[in-house]
Image (cartoon, rainbow, N blue to C red):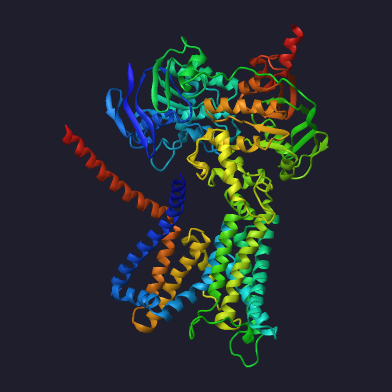
Amino acid sequence: MIKNIDNARKIKMGSSFMNSAIALVISLILGMVIIGISGYSPIESYIAIFGVSLGTLKGFALSLSQATPLIFTGLAFAFAYKVKMINTGAEGQLYAGAMAAALVGAYITNLPSGVHALLGFAAAFLAGGLAALFVALCKVYLNANEIIVSLMLNEIIIFFTSYLANGPLKPPGSGVGQTKMIEDTAKLTKLIPQTQLTTAIFIAIITACVLAYLLDKTVFGYEIKVTGHNLKASNVAGINVSKISLITFALSGAIAGMGGAAMVLGVNYRFVEGFSSGYGFAGISIAALAAYNPIGVIFSAFLIGILKSGTITLNRTTSIPVELVDIIQVLVLIFVAAPALIKSIMSRAKKVRSKSSREEHMEVKTSDI
Amino acid sequence: MEIIRMENISKIYPGTVALKGVDFTLNKQEIVSLLGENGAGKTTLMKILYGMTAPSSGRIFYKGEPVRFKRPIDAIEKGICMVHQHFMLVPAFTVVENIIAGSEPGSNIFLDKKKARQEVIDLISRFKFNVDPDAKVEKLSVGEQQRVEILKVLYRKADVIILDEPTAVLTPHEVDDLFAVLRRLKDEGKSIIIITHKLKETKEIADRVVVLRDGNLINDNVDPRKVSTKELSEMMVGHEVNLQARRPAKHIGEVCLKVENLTVEEDGKEKVKNVSFAIHHGEILGIAGIEGNGQTQIIEALTGLRKPKSMKLTLDGKEVTGKSSDFLKAGIGHVPEDRLSMGLVKEMSVMENMILGYHRESEFCSKKGLLLKKQISQYAEKLKKDFLVKAASIYSAVSSLSGGNQQKIIISRVFSREPKAIIVAHPTRGVDIGATEYIHNQLIELRDRGAAVLLISADLDEVRALSDRILVLYEGEIVSESMPGELSEVEMGLLMTGGNYMVEEGKQRD
């Protein structure tokens, strides 16, 4: 009996991961074709990408460090999506968090090192959370569209932080828009020397685990799921839908903000204008690739991390244009974003299979006669 | 003359057999009622005929020729059309536009609207349909919309018309109109199949009844004039049922739920006008009325989902105010109107749905806000057993259950919390007879344990059978209060459609 239940659960969970896996395989194959058509050796390129990213310590560390901010933004999108809200504001929340962490890191002194870094994360958590809370308030009380408000707020936050980095907070003699270097006590510990892989990856993984626990084991998580699946039923059940939406969306922003802290305290050691290469928006596809499962986000972010670090090594070691790797990345996302496409491919495959089995069946019958 | 013959039809879904070697025939100029409970396979059989799904085995003959429709459009071209339970009309279009949509006359580019309109008008007058061809569909009543659906299939030159649960949404009067239309169609040479689980109507309209049960053909040649509804229901369910027997309350106690001066305003209109009533402990108060006369607004006000313009609500003498969670906590249970959109989260498990609304009670959640999974699963197993919920396990998604079992989840959830008062809306809508009987028994048991029950249902038979006192609601006002049996079905039907003066005049004449 219990076995049955587990199986049923596995099948349900499995099917959404299956879609993602198939999307991945199809896009890798298509990627090979495209690389081939462009006149490069597909095998050689794939060896260059995956061999280095997975086969060498430095490459592996690079993949993980590339994945770190993506885990945060992926979690941010996935979590907001649990109440069926679309957080397109992760990019802005990331910048807000980064600026908050940079300020705490640079202007608060004489703290023990671990405490200082954590305080940086806390500041980023608050900054990202407040930015998202503003959006959620607009949505809940003014019935504004959260997608549009978030996008507009992104612009405001990004330009405002740029202004700060180019104006009042710019250290003398600096050529680019950036803030003062953070104190050594605020810097995250490197896990492998001479790489960008820091303890931030642990914070990211712990955050994912906390979210998974929250959703599965707590009343708050239960109410989030009910609200996300059926708004009317949650009203009938006496759930305070506004409160749940506000808290969930604010937490989503807070998580994205922590991604900014990871970049500032672990990689750049200061706020640098334009530091994000679209991490916030990449989070949307990473969450979709993970079927909005927090633990799944760790893996899908790692996968994109591999491709990103692959791009970097490819650029250094071969003549293959990096754009080709970008194409693979985009293909993965297109196929993930189109579950219907995957389903139709699957069902066609199934039909062919069942047809052949039916024909076998008929053959048996006729032979009986 | 035989027009359709389906031979030895089977349909196997993974895990279940929906139809087991069923034969079905339809003659020209015949009205056949395909009778069976939900899940008996009647809709599946018709979907196979209509080309919506393929049979696992079996053969179909149409006018003597073997056919196999791959898509509904193939069936429609041959003259077999289906009127679905849920209408497929464009509300903003006129009657004519809706009827011609999909098979517009004229060339490929230009629509010959004049010709289309004339054809529709001809159809309307030929079959004496009482519909304005230029009215917008959104302005039409449900009965009129159904007539538009039937016109749609006639416009497509249907010879065989399949109607899926056609009376589910109609008032008694509209049912009579529909049956008159169907008889005219039959006289014109059409053949009609009605999918239904309503016995009274089957007896009234059908020439022949075909009974299905659990995917088996029970009898394909029942003469409705020669059997009683009781015999029909036994054929359909497989054992004796008695839905109409009244079991009056034994101990009606003190006033429990008292509603005073309830007025609800919506879009600037008063949907409920100064309604007051009281329900005693151990009493079922039924509200009869055609849907849309203020029932939804009353339910929402009494469950805290809506703030009415005015209302004083007391439960055992204590005033209840606030949000829906406060009403639940005070002890007012709620079986909502629409189980899937309001009462359940279909993506979540049976277990999770069984505590919905009560999930913050100390039985299910710790002080720190953690769900007590072990207690919850034990509780769910108990409810599943006590209320005979048929589900693979308490971890199955609610969407995988039948309508009757979904409703049982709600009933088990609310009834087992022993509410002082309970608002029950359409408890057996779309539920098969077996489950209906069970739910009725549970409702009566709950009443006999002392709960005050407000029963709101569009099913007049249900209200008449269960209630200890009946109110009739018309345009937001209570137009009649009576004891069961005091008014006939016809009189109540009149009251429900605003004909209270006629009833009262009739009384005076007596």
As drawn, B381 above or below A202: above
- Tell me the quadrant of the picture where the N terminus of chain A can be found: top left
Image coordinates of residue A64 in percent, x first then y, are 47, 74
Image coordinates of residue A50 in percent, x first then y, are 37, 74
Q: Nearer the viewer, residue B125 or A233?
A: A233
Judge whether residue A358 can be spotted in this image.
yes
Q: Residue at x 78, y 30 (%)?
A: B256
Residue A336 image-quadrant placement? bottom left
Q: Residue at x 74, y 17 (%)?
A: B501
In the displayed orientation, state which residue is furthest to the top: B510
Image coordinates of residue B114 in percent, x first then y, are 47, 33
As drawn, A313 above or below B409: below
Q: How many marks?
A: 0
In the displayed orientation, state which residue is furthest to the bottom: A173
As drawn, A195 above or below B442: below
Q: Nearer the viewer, residue B193 or A77?
A: A77
- Tell me the quadrant of the picture where the C terminus of chain A can be found: top left
Image coordinates of residue A160 in percent, x first then y, are 66, 76
Judge whether residue B275 can be spotted in this image.
no
In the rendered structure, the answer to whether residue B46 lies left or right of residue B497 reads: left
